[in-house]
Amino acid sequence: MKIDEKILKEIETCVRCGYCQAYCPTYQATRHEGYNARGRMQLAKAVMNGDDISDLFRTRINQCLLCGSCSEHCPPGVHIPEIAERLRCALNEKYGLTAVGERMRKNITESGNVNGDEQKNRLLWLANLSEKYNVKINAKAEYLYLPGCVSSLYPSSYAVVQSFVGLLCISGTDFTVLGENELCCGYPLFIGGMESEAKSVARENVKCVKELGIDKIVTTCPSCYYMWKHHYPELLGEETGLKVIHGVELLAELCENGKLHPRELNETVTYHDPCDLGRKSGIFESPRKILTSIPGITFKEMRKNRVDAVCCGGGGNLESNDPVLSGKVSALRISQAAETGATTIVSCCQQCRRTLQSGARTTRTRIKVADITELLFKLCEE
Ligand code: SF4
Ligand code: SF4
């Protein structure tokens, strides 16, 4: 298997101290050594030394959430998500794509989105949006809003894009969407070990935005945000020249500038930090500023918050690779939310919303799950 020197050295840096164990969601959900960073690094060392454990190894690497929680607490600073991403690439090169990987590649490169839907369906969410909200499509505007594949194409997630668009209209923000011209950002390809395909998607997406003549992108998806902001310049070998922000940053600014006025909400609310937005991008304060500024709200932190937040179970393509394990992790996170006594858990990610909703349902926990856009829109809508 071809692995570059830097990654081999990183793998060797693991001293087997085990500090990562307490912070790894897949270990916490399984209590099995092979599911934490130390176990994964030991398997990697064995494979590098010629042991024939490829099936087990590949499964464990594909079960990593790439959440980065282990790396925050690793004394020598082994960067597990990067290692796992490189190993996924090397495994794909040596053994070909898994069935899940092949489906994802086909969907994104042939249909333009993660679930292989028809691109014209990307605007179905507009059908039941009130006519008072005017949405420009493929037009010149200050911001280009990219909802991402999940919010655009999964009816259960339409609320995120509808609420965000409603808030932009209420606040008088000038924006446009691409509709059927929006392509997947390529993040599922990148983290699935398909770097060259991800690079082609990145190139195409940047070209499309530049042709529209817009230089500000806002997205409500933390993975799109992370991909555009951090991986596109790396993959393309140059800065994109685009200002990329997450929707929650813009909403915090609009609340602060008096462009949005939420009504009172007498509820106890907790907040879940999405990994790509929080730990990986350092955006912790904007959502908390919004929530604590809502009159009447009681805000309670979970004991694992900010850099210590536990993944919702939806990271690293785990929901596609191992839905059962993904469900166990989301149940773990829901139990931490329930400990706070909150009646609503809020996040800033359509995928966290989906996995946490499913965790609440399977554990029969009486807690509402909402994206921050939904919560705010309900309180600002006239
Ligand atoms: S904390 Fe870091 S060095 Fe220690 S076992 Fe985990 S990955 Fe290895
Ligand atoms: S990235 Fe997350 S799931 Fe993967 S080994 Fe680290 S803590 Fe565990």
Image: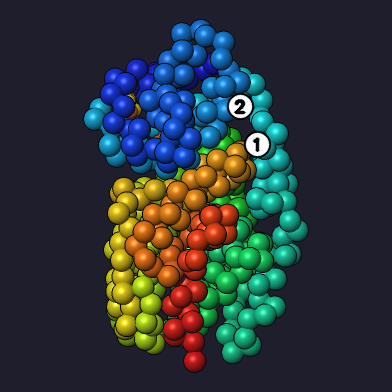
For residue 322, above or below residue 173: above
Please state which of residues 47 and 90 is positioned toward the viewer in this rendering: 47
Is 20 on the left or on the right of 220, as rendered?
left
Question: Which residue lies at the image location 60% right of the left edge and 65% below the top edge?
Answer: 157
Q: Secondary structure at mark 1?
A: helix
* Mark linked to residue 260: none
Is 270 on the left or on the right of 114, as rendered?
left
Q: Which quadrant holds residue 146?
A: bottom right
**Where residue 348 sits: x, y (%)?**
44, 63
* Mark linked to residue 101: 1
Q: Are marks 1 and 2 in contact (CB under 8 Å)?
A: yes
The residue under label 2 is which amino acid type? Asn
Residue position for label 2 = 92
**Where residue 156 sits: x, y (%)?**
63, 65
Question: Which residue lies at the image location 46% right of the left edge and 19% below the top edge?
Answer: 44
N-term mark: 1 or 2: 2
Q: Which quadrant holds residue 241?
A: bottom left
Q: Residue furthest bottom?
A: 382
Question: Which residue lies at the image location 46% right of the left edge and 29% below the top edge?
Answer: 32
Question: Which residue lies at the image location 55% right of the left edge and 33% below the top edge?
Answer: 62
**Where residue 273 sits: x, y (%)?**
38, 56
The residue under label 1 is which amino acid type? Gly
Dot 1: few (<14), some (14–19), or many (≥20) neighbours within 10 Å?
Answer: many
